[in-house]
Image (cartoon, rainbow, N blue to C red):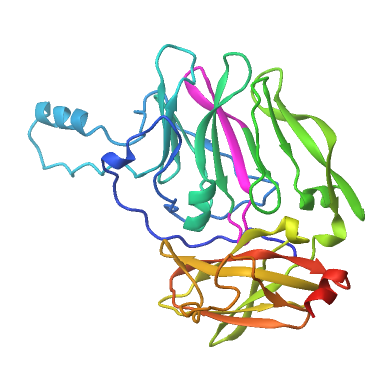
Amino acid sequence: MHHRSAIPLILPLLAAACGSTCQPAPAPVTAQSPTPTGPVVAAPADVPSPDTPEATTAAPADAGHDAAAEARESATAAPGPAAAAPEPAAAVLLSTQGDVDGAPGDEQITLRAGGVLSVGAASIRVEIEPSPDVYWKQQARLEIVNLGGKRRGVLFAAPTAELEDPPDRFRVYVLHDGSLVPVLDKVIGAYGITQLEFPGDGTARYIEDGWTACERVAGAKKVAREQVTLRLDAAGTRMIESGRKPTRHVQVCDELAACPYVDVLDAGGARRIGEILRDVRGPRAATVQSLDLGDHGAGPIAIRISEEKAEVTFLDEVFVEAGGARIYPRGCDVTPGPAYCAADGRPHVLRQGDTLDLVFDAGGDAVLFARGYYVPTPTAATREVR
């Protein structure tokens, strides 16, 4: 299995403004995916870039312009050259509301394009790592979490800038003397979503994924995945690791490397993008995984899935998402279609040395999805499909 690296992705421009549909709701709302306002370089997963406090107490909750106040000031000002019209407030990416400060009444909580997170009148500028729209919609969230007793925090979780099933970066902020203070900034896991739970006793907890467990015990053949507990320190200024304990989830480390490769086929030849169906050994582990293919202009997109390892891959469904649409490979519009066209339990089988070339009538930024599992060889399951 190759080593992962955080690779910045170029994202489409955001819509210029939000209408009434962007008004906050009691539950977290994903309004739009982020677009960096300038060059953004993703930090290494273990060293997140720090967030930057704003001049929070004087700024309005949305950290934008107060058009009505500016109009009143303009009407009473001495005549002079015409002033430039105020810029519209940045588009809302996420929003929710609730009680964070413990005082009567709920606070409006918003994250706007450009990275301004506001809780009531307090704001802080946060880093938003570039991420494909499909990952942002699935993983980004803004919510209030219980930090014990009456203490509340604001959780901002969003995918990191990774090509393959990016893990989440979790950040938690508390209100202190009218300002937002970050108390947690941590990337959890190596692939996909690792759940971070706040049970209400002042802690946050998660079970490490298999990749993290095997990296923790170098050279191990089998590792018990641990439950990690984080707790606010005595000063209440940061969440630190306060405990670990083994769980019944065991990871066999030499199974982590099994997965077929994905290449994009274009005028420059075959370009290896990554791997898919990682760590899904056996039919009970069957799942859907994704891999960002990048921007392909007007399309079409041609890929090759190659089984190069000692395993058999059972590929039940393959499609891409581009421009908000799900697109299946050419040839899937016939009846009956190839086995990889529908999630019907009738898989396309790839044995070691096999390849599958697919063409998608799609363009622009595209993310590949594959549903299935693999079985290492030699096994009885392998002999059954020959």
Q: Could you say where residue 288 lies in the image, as x and y percent from the top left?
A: 62, 59
Left or right of 203? Residue 70 is: left
Is residue 307 visible in this depiction of the protein?
yes
Left or right of 217? Residue 3 is: left
Which residue sits furthest top? Answer: 104
Q: Residue at x 45, y 43 (%)?
A: 115
Q: Could you say where residue 179 lies in the image, as x and y percent from the top left?
A: 49, 23
Q: Quadrant of the C terminus?
A: bottom right
Q: Is residue 219 above or below residue 68?
A: below
Q: Residue at x 51, y 40 (%)?
A: 141
Residue situated in front as seen by the camera: 121 or 306: 306
Q: Could you say where residue 126 lies in the image, as x and y percent from the top left?
A: 51, 40
Q: Is residue 118 above or below residue 221?
A: above
Left or right of 286? Residue 221 is: right
The stretch in magenta equals 161-183
Q: Could you say where residue 333 lies in the image, as x and y percent from the top left?
A: 46, 78
Question: Magenta stretch containing residue 116, yes or no?
Answer: no
Which residue sits furthest left? Answer: 79
Tell me the quarter of the picture where residue 347 sits. Answer: bottom right
Q: Is residue 302 above or below residue 132?
A: below
Tell me the quarter of the picture where residue 81 sits. Answer: top left
The secondary structure that dominates the magenta segment is: strand
Q: Quadrant of the N terminus?
A: bottom right
Question: Magenta stretch containing residue 165, yes or no?
Answer: yes
